[in-house]
Amino acid sequence: MGCKDLEPMEKWVKGEGEGCRPCKIATVGIGRYRKALQEAGLDSVMEPVSKILDSEDVDTIGKVAATMDQIKATATPDLRAVLESIDCDIQKKEECGLCQDVPDAQPAEVNAEG
């Protein structure tokens, strides 16, 4: 899958466009990144995302998006390609009901208490 105009997730989530961009990252991005990293044997790489989600920070999704960009920047080329493909899926889908439209989408565990 090619995405010529793929933006860093931190920039993209703050932009305007169709659908709910923070929703797309929360419902699809986090779950798909977690799955890709688990398959690569890198479960611990998602720990910073979990810490952000557990915080009471007002810009939770912005920080998650920035962390996703950092994860991509340090990934092996093969893993980076997988993560960029996930980003492409997220950025190119227009409906906020994205979770049902993206293969292997899994809702993120945003709040363990409820």
Image (cartoon, helix red, strand yellow):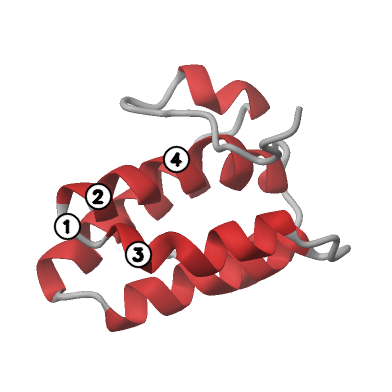
Label 1 vs 4, first from the N-terminus: 4
Label 2 vs 4, first from the N-terminus: 4
The image quarter in which residue 113 lies: top right
From the image, state whether disc 3 or disc 4 is nearer to you.
3
**Which residue is rendered at x = 41% and y = 54% of the image?**
87
Marks 3/4: CA–CA distance = 14 Å
- Which residue does the numbered mark 3 point to in the structure image? 44
Q: Is residue 9 visible?
A: no
Q: Nearest the camera: 107 or 85?
A: 107
Label for residue 54? none
Label 3 vs 4, first from the N-terminus: 4
- Which residue does the numbered mark 1 point to in the structure image? 41
Pointers 1 and 4 in contact (C-beta within 8 Å) = no
Q: Nearest the camera: 100 or 75?
A: 75
Marks 1/3: CA–CA distance = 9 Å
- Which residue does the numbered mark 2 point to in the structure image? 38
Label for residue 31? 4
Left/right of residue 35 with respect to residue 67 in the rendered view: left
**Which residue is rendered at x = 24% and y = 75% of the image?**
75
